[in-house]
Amino acid sequence: MYRKKLIGPFRQLIPMTGLALKGAIADSQLTILENAGILIKDGDILAISSFEDLAKNSEDVEIQELKGNHTCIPGLIDAHTHICYGGSRAKDYAMRNAGKTYLEIAKAGGGIWDTVTQTRKASKEALIKSTTKLANRHLKNGVTTLEVKSGYGLSVDEELKMLHAIKETNSLVAADLIPTCLAAHMLPKDYDGNQEAYLAEISTKLFPILKEQRLANRIDAFVEESAFSAAQIAPYFEKAKAMGFDITVHADQFSTSGSQVAVDFGALSADHLEASTETEINLLAKSDTIATALPGASLGLGCGFTPARQLLDAGGSLAIASDHNPGSAPMGDLLTQASILGAFEKLSNAEVLAGITFRAAAALKLNNRGRLAKGYHADFIGFHTDYYQEILYNQGNFKPCMVWKNGDLVFDKHS
Ligand code: NIG
Ligand code: FE
């Protein structure tokens, strides 16, 4: 039994090292290693260097030599998804394209509430099955870590069902699933009370169980006119922070105020931001909160993109996530969406790749992935090409041919 593993050579390897967490990045700042190998021990990277040099010193090393041309980047990190749900919202999508707005559909009883009804009907086992399928689809597309939110249960018991389903799915799939509690997604229509009463019930009854059963360490809320106001969410986030949870916010999707809440509470990330103006952009740029663009929601709703270029130029940090959900973002293809955002927002290759690797890792408070260097998880993906620029150039139509998680080959298109 070998103790170490050497994988390579990669014609190009982009380690995403030496790049700042905030601000614009030029492609000229990218480190590009040629004919590199990755030496791995116990799932972590031991060294990255010339494959030839590493292979010379091969005592106790299993060498997995790649044939043909491969370019390697870190495993992708999708920092915002809702892939645990029941049913479909194809009807909503058709209605929107026929002229109804997302908020009109929600007011008429469709939208998020429709998925809540379907998710409540689904057993935990059914949710595990569908979430596993989607997580495996993301894995084939290169996503080795993805966040998954609850938020279609909207009662203590139903949110627990979802979070248990997410936890159990995590033990069945190769990717790491990072759970987030989104019980504050909307006021449940069958709740006999107001927003304040609902949030108080969730924070007093659900939060302690999340801690006890280690179901989630992140609390999210949809701050929006149709969901919860900044004033309503403040005591909820105060309670969450006092209990040691990390905060993340669905902010500025249709109207502003969410990003101010995110910054006030030191949120890890403020996500959506399609409606953000210069005021919110500057606020976020000055803060440590990561701005997470969700181009999949813009494509699903047919609306404008998050002002990613302005956020970066103002000095902010930008992650890019799929928001994969049955309503606003049904596509669920991070690489396609990030490439398209890059074309519309004029983002460099380096900025797009940063947004789906180490900047996304920071939005999840994970400092052990998203870059390829000694001590980081050996999560990386290979594409059949000599040049890294081919990856985004193909706008998502060029998929990875190999995916490694903790040093193990978990997807191989050749086999
Ligand atoms: O991130 N905006 C609120 N929540 C989700 C949509 C959920 C849904 O439509 O089911 C989002 O877009
Ligand atoms: Fe979302």
Image (cartoon, rainbow, N blue to C red):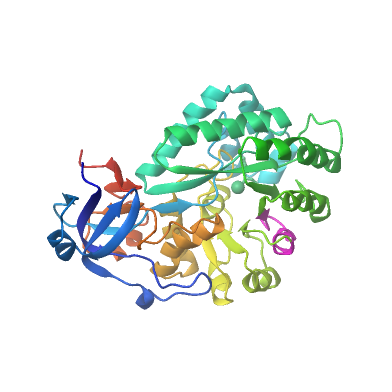
Note whether residue 116 is visible.
no
Q: Residue at x 15, y 56 (%)?
A: 58
In front: 254, or 325? 325
Q: Position of residue 241 (x, y in %)?
A: 73, 53
Q: Quadrant of residue 82?
A: top right
Residue 211 in view (yes/no): yes
Q: What percent of the width, then of the height, locates residue 208?
A: 72, 38
Which residue sits at x=69%, y=39%?
105
Residue 257 x, y percent position in the rendering: 75, 60
Residue 28 figure quarter: bottom left
Q: 379 or 14, which is in the foreground?
A: 379
Q: The N terminus appears in which quarter of the rendering?
A: top left
- Number of marks in picture: 0
Image check: 241 left or right of 231?
Answer: left
Q: Quadrant of the C terminus?
A: top left
Depth check: give the residue in front, 261 or 339: 261
Does the magenta run of residues contain 176? no
- Indicate yes or no whether the magenta region holds residue 262: yes
Quarter-of-image position of residue 394: bottom left
Q: Which one is in front, 236 or 51?
A: 51
Q: Position of residue 135 (x, y in %)?
A: 44, 38
Q: Which residues are magenta?
A: 250-264
Residue at 80%, 52% in the rendered image: 229
Lateral position of residue 171 relative to residue 198, left or right: left
